[in-house]
Amino acid sequence: MADLIREAPIGQLIRFITSNKVLQYPEEKPGFQLPESYNAALNSSAASPSKEKPSDSEASSTTEYNVSVPPQTLQREKSNESAKARDDLEATGDGLQINREPSLQRSKSIPLAPTKTADGEILVDWYTTDDPANPQNWSNRKRGFVALIICLYTFAVYSGSAIYVSSIYGVMSVFNVGEIAASLPLALYVLAYGIGPLLFSPLSELPLVGRNPVYAVTFSLFFILSIPTALASNFAGLLVLRFLQGFLGSPCLATGGATMQDMYSMLKHWVLCYPVSPSPWKAGAGPSGKSSGSPLPS
């Protein structure tokens, strides 16, 4: 329960006020020690000698070689080297290899050794296969609670677009505009929540930011803007506020699926995805069948 409160906006606010003295992460506690595999990787990284700088003659010969080779060849060689390095990393990365093996149960506590790249960088992974910090190792109750919040969040944002339809005639009479102009707040809202993910989705992928700050800040502003939107005294202000509401409510529409993927692995929970995947085809089955003249089941 403490972990759930710590990850919530109120928990992050408490941590900020107390300078991370309350609701600490395991790494912030005084008695925390790194696993032996990480200590060994750090010690080997510190003990490895630095690469010698090439001499002037070698540098000049390399420069001459690069000039003599066509750019297309160099680009192709660089792409091949990058692909080979990526394949080697996937072949040696314990975390990626375990994710690809559905037969391996995550309930087994298997230490994961950190992967060290060719340039000496250490790729940080989970400490063990059953690391409690990994969202895919959360309990079903905790994952279900977070999934319910994402679903309610998405429902609120989607409802905010269509719920305006019932007030179109009221807007027409209050602001003395036509029906087409009165439909603009609906169109701008939908347009804005299509534009918003272009900014917020890449922002949520940054390790320094993450998903929760994007959710918390944008939805708080979305909620606050509901008040001036209802009290707007002119039509132009209503248009601007509706656009901002759609823009700030958009993160759940695109990033919500990424949050679900963080918690549920396709290898283990594919049964949950099976009933949902045909739903778009079912939605179009009625109109397509009716237009083609084929009978529809009652």
Image: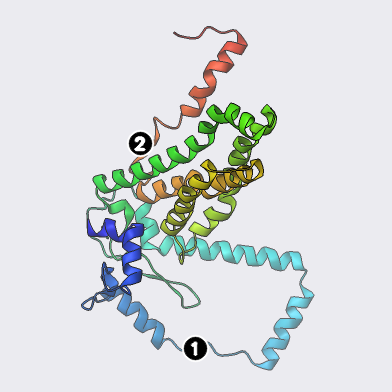
Foreground residue among 127 and 242: 242
Residue type at mark 1? Answer: Ser
Q: Position of residue 11 (x, y in %)?
A: 31, 61
Residue closer to the observer: 265 or 116 = 265
Q: Quadrant of residue 175?
A: top right
**Left or right: 298 with respect to 64?**
left
What is the secondary structure assignment of the residue under circle 1? loop
Q: Nearer the viewer, residue 117 or 249?
A: 249
* Residue at the spot 26% in from the left edge and 75% down from the top edge: 36
Asked if residue 48 can be seen in this view, the reply is yes
Q: Are marks 2 and 1 in contact (CB under 8 Å)?
A: no
Callout 1 crowding tier (Cα within 10 Å): few <14, some 14–19, many ≥20: few
The residue labelled by disc 2 is 272
> Residue 208 location, x and y as percent?
46, 67
Secondary structure of the residue carrying tag 2 is: helix
Cα separation between marks 2 and 1: 50 Å
Image quadrant in which the C terminus is located: top left
Position of 291 relative to 195 (above/below): above
Which residue does the image show at 50% across and 9% down from the upper left? 296
Residue 132 at least partly seen: no
The kind of residue on which mark 2 rests is Leu
Side of 10 relative to 161 (left or right): left
**Disc on res. 50:** 1
Q: Quadrant of the N terminus?
A: bottom left
Residue 69 lies, with reference to residue 48, above or below; the image says above
Q: Earlier in the sequence, mark 2 or mark 1?
A: 1
Residue visible at 48% across and 41% down in the picture: 157
